[in-house]
Image (cartoon, helix red, strand yellow):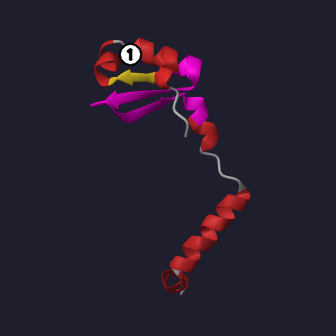
């Protein structure tokens, strides 16, 4: 993930002026909150998170196969 330095805000500044953080998210799509000069939190628009959380059928099938492979013995016991 590329981080735009213009979207970084200190924890103190975010605490004192959250509307600035919201404006940064509106403008840049995200905002990074720094704690002790290190990235600590990321703020995203809800729509962006909602879109990225959708899983395609192919991805879901791959995940299911992986879980079945790892837990085959448990699934066989449950199937009885």
Q: Is residue 56 left or right of residue 67?
A: right
Residue shown at 68% from the left, 65% from the top? 61
Q: Is residue 75 above or below residue 58?
A: below
Around disc 1, counting alpha carbons within 10 Å, would you say few (fewer than 14), some (14 to 19), or many (20 or more)? some
Query: Where residue 13 appears, x then y in whole percent?
Result: 32, 16
Query: Please, what secondary structure does the residue beneath circle 1 have?
Result: helix
Q: Where are the magenta residues, as a range?
A: 25-48
Please tell me which residue lies in front, 49 or 7: 7
Query: Where residue 37 appears, x then y in whole percent?
Result: 31, 30
Query: Where residue 8 appears, x then y in whole percent?
Result: 43, 24
Task: Count the labels in the image.
Answer: 1
Q: Is residue 16 above or below residue 76?
A: above
Residue shown at 47% from the left, 17% from the top? 22
Q: Is residue 29 left or right of residue 10?
A: right
Residue for badge 1:
18
Residue shown at 64% from the left, 46% from the top? 54
């Amino acid at each position: 993930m590329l981080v735009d330095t213009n979207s970084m805000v200190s924890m103190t500044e975010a605490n004192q002026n959250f509307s600035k953080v919201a404006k940064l998210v509106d403008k840049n799509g995200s905002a990074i909150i720094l704690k002790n000069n290190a990235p600590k939190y990321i703020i995203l628009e809800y729509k962006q998170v909602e879109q990225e959380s959708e899983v395609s059928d192919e991805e879901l099938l791959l995940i299911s196969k992986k879980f079945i492979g790892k837990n085959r013995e448990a699934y066989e016991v449950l199937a009885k």
